[in-house]
């Protein structure tokens, strides 16, 4: 054994022992800081210990013959690289540094010294790490920006751009797959954008990544889609700042470029004895680790040099090769920067970061038009250049990037806030306003948030043009968030209130056309997003992301609908389809006590004088009117419940339309019943043993059309059965069913007639129709005609109804009495107070004789008498000059008022026992002329 080898072994053993001792000291520092053990170590003490490791690593690296920075690029050479180093605890050192980063905020003083020593050691340890630790190093270094002082942010970015990222994210596996370090780039970007408020740091990091990695836009979109609000803001700016514009007519890029200041601090020469130390910008790089350590003993390799130092070292080492460093982009050009460009369309199409192309632009990245790009990058040359093109359409991207694109649009649109947004108390402070614009909880001004919404619209309109193959889930999610954006940016005008703001112009010029294309290509998806209970994938933004009551969900949803109306997106066809679902959802989901919360929003939509719709009153209520034309009684009854709710909320409905609707509904009741009777008669004559059709489904033919019945209407009752599964519902009580269950056509028809009269009576009161005007008015003529048709259509008092013997209270009889009461009130509303020919006064002796004969027949005769009596039509009562009738009126029996709230029936109440006894005893005469 030679003496030199013995000395070498002794030195190695001594170095290993010292290495372990220093590691134990680092662990002790960590424990004392973590548990606040006094005396706490200072940042200077820890920095001195870390500097020992940096010098030791550089000393070891100096003795290595092969270039570790060349080997580190190829993962297959990791065994060769690791075998060239002495066996020291490099992994334990990495773990110790990681633990110190966790407790860095606990250091009382000396943080800057500690931070510089930490960054230097992390840069020096890179060549000594195995595969897994190399993949984790970029994120570890970027995470230090969250714990170290802002004064070190520039040093952190420099360490990433010049010592870490060039040797980690460029590693390729045998099958040319990206390494894990490359997949963590989006996390590195988000950390820097979140904790550094200096745009120069953002630009420096992004330009470094664009030099080293293809498809950086995917990482930027990932940050926009899933990052924090602060990082999303900066990432969106960088996206539109660096990448060539995909639609020059969509936005003014000059204004966008002025929003981002790029005051990059140049990276200076790292040579220890540089004649222009601190002033000369680095332009060359030397990857020889021995030369690097010799000329910069305190800096990790590689060595970055200015032109003068590079020439001087090259004279001493003629065999050395130096690489060029790309200079930062001084100005982002919107046109081709090729001096020999001959294209007619000079708009920038791509940007190249290779040194070959950059040499034509003063060593700055160069932008090419489409023609120059094809000339410089084709199958013959430029295949290895790092080129970034303008964003391609979303549907041409790979699935992962397409998902990032869609979520980016959704996230940016979600950032927009209403102009009257008031941040919480926790954000209200002395500096709660910046440039006159209030700040939100993330210290982002409302103006900035509105700008983020515009970025989302630019991506949506420019890159998400709908096609027939667009997935409906993706399209529905975007549409729902776009409707939310319309809501929060409604009526965004400038301070003077005279000129439309940029957002309003964007809506009119671009977004409306995009929505019309969606409506044309994907009509069903467009409609589903406007419903009160849209598909699950469309429940994003606004009230869908909060814990709200059913009423609040409907209220916010209707507000969204209102905000779309001024832009002519809602056509009459869409309106007729959507509004029945909203009215049925209100009927089922909103409690009685909460109905008034919807009064304002429903008045804005349905009041003829307040509605922003471009429809007349007839078109506005057409969705109700069509439910009285050749439809079943169940469909009419559902529509009448909607009108009843609107009437209760004091929303005025034109009487002309009400009379037209009710007339159509009663007419189909009448002819439908006649057709059913005719069909039953034919069936009996032919002795067919088959049951009639379902009673609730009525025929639609008139007498003249019975021989050739028309096709039945396709309108069926609207079903909103998804209300119980609505997400984010905070109500404890399930919605109640307001519909009274009847089984026969006669019962459904009678219910419809009662609702019609009740709605009509209340609407006449709301619209201040003058009372007691006699028969010479159009209102009176329409009311008389309607009541007359109801008597024949619903057959009140004329049907073959038989009460069940064991039922104490018959709902049909109660409903009949209620109809007579409402009809009487309508006649009293119109009849003169002092008629010229008043009706005859009843003769007292006749009444007394009637009272004496009021005895119930024997039980054996009740059934027979009941059938005879209910089949007899009572005589109408002429009301003086009115000339009409109000149906049979009980004599000497108090007329109970209809049970209603403000004149509107809410439930079918039970009438008094006297009225029931009148109907239940058909042998007694209760009607007088």
Image (cartoon, rainbow, N blue to C red):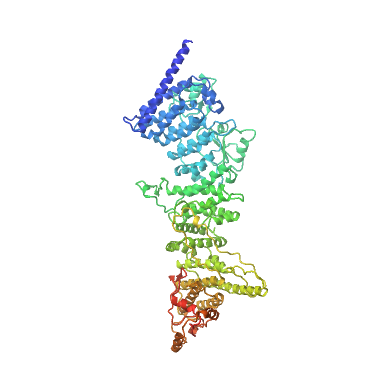
Q: Nearer the viewer, residue 183 or 338?
A: 183
The number of discs equals: 0
Which residue occupies 66% across, 74% down?
A: 682
In the image, taking residue 886 as reference, residue 45 lies left or right, namely: left
Residue 774, horizontal then vertical, whole percent: 48, 81
Which residue occupies 31% across, 30% down?
A: 38
Q: Nearer the viewer, residue 543 or 672?
A: 672
Which residue occupies 45% across, 13% down?
A: 7
Relative height, residue 232 to residue 148 (above, below) = below
Relative height, residue 663 to residue 533 (above, below) = below
Residue 73, horizontal then vertical, whole percent: 54, 28
Q: Which of 321 and 628 is in front in this view?
A: 628
Q: Which residue lies furthest to the left in this view?
A: 38
Q: Is residue 842 visible?
A: no
Q: Residue furthest top?
A: 2
Residue 902, horizontal then vertical, whole percent: 43, 70
Q: Can residue 849 be seen in this view?
A: yes
Relative height, residue 563 to residue 212 (above, below) = below
Residue 779, horizontal then vertical, whole percent: 50, 76
Q: Nearer the viewer, residue 585 or 399?
A: 585
In the image, taking residue 116 as reference, residue 175 lies left or right, namely: right
């Amino acid at each position: 054994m030679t003496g030199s080898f013995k000395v070498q072994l002794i030195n190695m053993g001594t170095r290993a022992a010292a290495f372990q001792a220093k590691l134990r000291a680092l662990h002790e520092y960590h424990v004392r800081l973590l548990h606040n053990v006094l005396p706490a170590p200072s940042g200077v003490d820890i920095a001195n210990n870390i500097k020992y490791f940096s010098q030791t690593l550089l000393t070891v690296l100096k003795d290595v013959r092969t270039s570790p920075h060349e080997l580190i690029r190829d993962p297959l050479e990791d065994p060769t690289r690791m075998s060239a180093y002495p066996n020291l605890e490099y992994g334990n050192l990495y773990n110790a540094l990681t633990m110190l980063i966790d407790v860095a905020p606990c250091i009382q003083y000396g943080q800057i010294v500690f931070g510089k020593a930490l960054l230097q050691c992390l840069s020096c340890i890179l060549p000594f790490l195995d595969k897994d630790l190399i993949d984790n190093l970029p994120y570890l270094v970027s995470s230090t920006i969250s714990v170290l002082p802002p004064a070190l942010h520039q040093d952190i970015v420099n360490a990433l751009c010049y010592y870490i990222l060039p040797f980690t994210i460029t590693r390729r596996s045998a099958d040319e797959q990206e390494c894990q370090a490359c997949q963590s780039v989006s996390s590195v970007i988000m950390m820097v954008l979140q904790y550094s408020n200096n745009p120069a740091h953002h630009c420096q990091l992004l330009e470094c990544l664009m030099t080293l990695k293809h498809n950086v836009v995917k990482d930027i979109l990932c940050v926009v889609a899933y990052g924090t609000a602060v990082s999303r803001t900066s990432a969106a700016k960088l996206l539109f700042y660096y990448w060539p514009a995909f639609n020059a007519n969509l936005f003014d890029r000059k204004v966008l470029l002025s929003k981002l200041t790029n005051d990059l601090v140049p990276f200076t020469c790292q040579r220890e004895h540089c004649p222009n130390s601190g002033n000369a910008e680095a332009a060359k790089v030397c990857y020889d680790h021995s030369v690097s350590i010799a000329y910069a003993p305190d800096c990790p390799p590689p060595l970055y040099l200015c032109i003068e130092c590079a020439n001087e070292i090259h004279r001493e080492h003629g065999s050395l090769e130096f690489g060029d460093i790309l200079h930062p982009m001084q100005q982002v050009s919107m046109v081709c920067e090729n001096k020999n460009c001959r294209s007619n369309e000079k708009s920038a199409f791509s940007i190249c970061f290779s040194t070959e192309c950059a040499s034509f632009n003063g060593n700055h990245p160069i932008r090419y038009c489409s023609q120059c790009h094809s000339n410089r990058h084709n199958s013959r040359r430029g295949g290895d250049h790092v080129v970034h093109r303008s964003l391609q359409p979303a549907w041409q991207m790979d699935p992962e990037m397409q998902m990032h694109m869609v979520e980016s649009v959704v996230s940016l649109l979600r950032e927009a806030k209403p102009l009257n947004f008031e941040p919480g108390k926790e954000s209200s402070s002395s500096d709660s306003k910046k440039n006159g614009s209030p700040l939100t909880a993330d210290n982002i001004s409302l103006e900035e948030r509105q700008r983020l919404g515009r970025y989302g619209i630019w991506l949506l309109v420019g890159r998400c043009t709908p096609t027939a193959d667009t997935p409906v889930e993706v399209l529905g999610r975007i549409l729902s968030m776009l409707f939310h954006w319309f809501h929060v940016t409604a009526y965004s005008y400038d301070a003077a209130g005279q000129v439309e703001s940029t957002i309003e112009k964007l809506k009119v010029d671009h977004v409306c056309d995009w929505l019309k294309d969606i409506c044309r290509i994907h009509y069903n998806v467009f409609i589903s997003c406007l419903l009160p209970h849209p598909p699950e994938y469309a429940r994003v933004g606004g009230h869908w992301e909060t814990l709200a009551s059913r009423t609040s969900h409907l209220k916010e949803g209707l507000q969204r609908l209102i905000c779309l109306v001024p832009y002519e997106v809602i056509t009459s066809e869409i309106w007729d389809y959507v509004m029945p679902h909203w009215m049925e959802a209100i009927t089922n989901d909103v409690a009685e006590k909460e109905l008034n919360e919807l009064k304002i929003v429903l008045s804005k939509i349905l009041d003829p004088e307040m509605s922003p719709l471009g429809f007349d009153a007839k078109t506005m209520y057409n969705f109700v009117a069509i439910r009285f034309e050749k439809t079943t009684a169940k469909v009419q009854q559902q529509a009448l419940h909607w009108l009843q709710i609107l009437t209760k909320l004091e929303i005025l409905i034109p009487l002309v339309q009400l009379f037209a609707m009710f007339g159509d509904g009663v007419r189909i009741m009448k002819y439908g019943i006649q057709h059913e009777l005719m069909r039953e008669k034919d069936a009996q004559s032919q002795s067919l043993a088959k049951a009639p059709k379902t009673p609730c489904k009525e025929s639609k033919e008139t007498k003249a059309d019975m021989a050739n019945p028309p096709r039945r209407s396709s309108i069926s009752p609207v079903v909103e059965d998804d209300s119980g599964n609505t997400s984010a519902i905070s109500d404890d009580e399930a919605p109640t069913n307001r519909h009274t269950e009847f089984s026969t056509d006669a019962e459904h028809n009678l219910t419809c007639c009662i609702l019609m009269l009740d709605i009509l009576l209340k609407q006449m009161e709301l619209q201040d129709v003058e009372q007691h005007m006699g028969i010479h008015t159009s209102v009176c003529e329409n009311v008389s005609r309607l009541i007359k048709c109801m008597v024949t259509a619903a057959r009140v008092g004329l049907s073959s109804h038989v009460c069940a013997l064991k039922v104490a209270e018959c709902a049909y009889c109660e409903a009949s009495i209620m109809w007579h009461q409402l009809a009487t009130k309508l006649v009293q509303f119109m009849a003169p107070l002092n008629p010229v020919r008043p009706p005859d006064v009843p003769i007292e002796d006749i009444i007394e004789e009637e009272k004496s004969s009021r005895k119930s027949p024997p039980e054996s005769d009740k059934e027979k008498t009941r059938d005879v009596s209910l089949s007899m039509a009572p005589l109408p009562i002429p009301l003086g000059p009115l000339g009409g009738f109000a149906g049979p009126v009980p004599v000497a029996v108090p007329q109970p008022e209809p049970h209603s709230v403000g004149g509107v029936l809410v439930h079918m109440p039970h009438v008094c026992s006297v009225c029931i006894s009148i109907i239940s005893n058909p042998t007694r005469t209760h009607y007088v002329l």
